[in-house]
Image: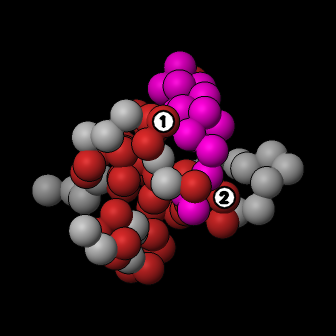
Amino acid sequence: MTEERHTFTDAQWQRIEPSMPPCKGRPGGAYRTFFDALLWITRTGAPWRDLPERLGSWNVVYQRYAYWCKKGYFERLFQGVQQPD
């Protein structure tokens, strides 16, 4: 599998990025790596521990994912990027 299959394109990212919650103490690029990691996990179906190192520590990515789920960030993000009918 190629790396491109598991990352967002620049056009896709430009659509998602404005809906991101504030990133305290981290550069904005950290969000893109985080989302690329989530995309890799969902597309491969692999366990968290198999996340490639280039996408970050599996435990850090998982903890952030769990936090975002708990805080409802994904629901707000999905509502923000939906296209009107």
Kindly identify the amino acid type of the residue bearing the numbered disc 2: Ala
Q: Residue at x 34, y 63 (%)?
A: 6
Image side of residue 22 versus residue 32, left or right: right
Seen from the viewer's position, the closer of residues 13 and 49 is 49
What SS does tag 2 mark? Answer: helix
Determine the CA span between mark 2 and mark 1. Answer: 19 Å
The residue where tag 2 is placed is: 30
Judge whether 14 appears above or below 79 on screen.
below
Of tags 2 and 1, which is closer to the observer? 1
User: Where is mark 1, residue-wise?
Assistant: 49
| Residue 55 in the figure: left or right of residue 45 | right
Mark closest to the chain's N terminus, 2 or 1: 2
Residue 27: x and y in percent read 77, 62
Q: Is residue 85 visible?
A: yes
Query: Outermost residue, top direction?
Result: 70
On-image quarter of the C terminus: bottom left
Q: Residue at x 36, y 45 (%)?
A: 41
Q: Can you give x and y, in whole percent of width and height, for residue 48 in the image?
A: 44, 35
Q: Residues within 10 Å of mark 1 (few under 14, many from 20)?
A: few
Checking the image for residue 39, the label placed there is none
- On whether residue 3 falls in the magenta region, the answer is no
Q: Total of numbered circles in the picture?
A: 2
Against 17, residue 66 (above or below) is above
| Label 2: few (<14), some (14–19) or many (≥20) C-alpha neighbours in 10 Å | few
Residue range in magenta is 54-70
Prevailing secondary structure of the magenta residues: helix
Asked if the stretch drawn in magenta spans residue 67, the answer is yes
**Residue at the extreme left:** 85
